[in-house]
Image: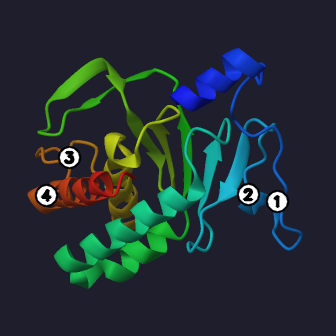
């Protein structure tokens, strides 16, 4: 909360400086805007045909920033893997991403392929087309595992069997240092823009 908001809250008793109501444009579908008092809810991601996000509230992450991140991801994928751009576009046009701040544990692989048990994770790709990303209100997309999970989703769509859970390890095929480079490059660009 900013100083001005805090001052107004203390002096005038305004309570929270978050909006108390939202006026919805009449021509928008309800799944295309976040309803501030509905939890959880599924919201369509702009510019991606059948892609949705599930959020607990309107302050965790907004659909516009997710759409920007996905567009940057596709641009970077196009540069690195021009032969599989169609697969990446198809995959990203048919996903559901859940965002919340729940702590989750699972067994899995580190980025270099080492298997670990009962590790705290910041993201999971459950199936072809469905993933979860840990995020809290105020987090920038570049600080989350979102772009990392997009790589898993595209690889799963490409192989139809797995999303290469061991990353750059030898147990599964698909992930290379170039995929890790995409994550680093996209997250750097997003952080520069404050996304």
Residue drawn at (28%, 18%) of the image? 117
Residue 163 in view of the camera: no
Give the image location of residue 153, x and y in percent. Answer: 40, 57
What crowding class fits label 1: few (fewer than 14 Cα within 10 Å), some (14-19), or many (20 or more)?
Answer: some
Label pair 2/1, CB-CB below 8 angstroms: yes
Q: Residue furthest front?
A: 11
Label 3 and label 2: CA atoms lie apart by: 35 Å
Residue beneath disc 1: 30
Q: Residues within 10 Å of mark 2 (few under 14, many from 20)?
A: some
Point 78% across, 47% down: residue:
35
Residue 167, numbered label: 3
> Comparing marks 3 and 2, which lies closer to the viewer?
2
Residue underneath mark 4: 176
Is the residue 53 above or below the residue 50 in the image? Answer: above
* Any part of residue 65 in sight: yes
- Tell me residue 87's x, y (percent): 38, 76
Front tag of 4 and 1: 1
Of pointers 3 and 1, the one earlier in the residue sequence: 1
Residue 120 is drawn in which quadrant? Answer: top left
- Between marks 3 and 1 in the image, the one whose residue lies nearer the viewer: 1
Viewer-nearest of discs 4 and 2: 2
Q: Is residue 5 left or right of residue 161?
A: right
For the residues labelled 3 and 4, the Cα–Cα distance comes to: 7 Å
| Element carrying mark 2 | loop
Q: How is the image coloured?
A: rainbow
Q: Nearer the viewer, residue 173 or 73?
A: 73
């Amino acid at each position: 909360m900013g100083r001005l908001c805090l001052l107004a809250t203390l002096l005038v008793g305004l309570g929270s400086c978050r909006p108390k109501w939202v006026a919805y444009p009449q021509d928008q579908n309800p799944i295309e805007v976040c309803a501030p008092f509905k939890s959880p809810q599924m919201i369509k991601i702009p510019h991606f045909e059948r892609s949705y996000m599930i959020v607990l509230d309107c302050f965790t992450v907004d659909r516009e920033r997710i759409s920007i991140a996905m567009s940057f991801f596709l641009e970077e994928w196009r540069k690195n893997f021009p032969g599989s751009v169609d697969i990446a576009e198809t995959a990203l046009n048919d996903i559901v991403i859940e965002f919340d701040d729940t702590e989750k544990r699972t067994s899995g692989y580190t980025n270099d392929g080492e298997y670990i048990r009962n590790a705290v994770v910041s993201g999971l790709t459950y199936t072809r087309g469905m993933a979860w990303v840990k995020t809290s209100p105020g987090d920038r997309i570049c600080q989350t595992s979102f772009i990392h999970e997009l790589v898993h989703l595209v690889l799963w769509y490409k192989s139809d069997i797995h999303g290469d859970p061991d990353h750059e390890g030898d147990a599964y095929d698909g992930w290379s240092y170039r995929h890790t480079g995409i994550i680093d490059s996209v997250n750097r660009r997003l952080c520069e823009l404050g996304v």
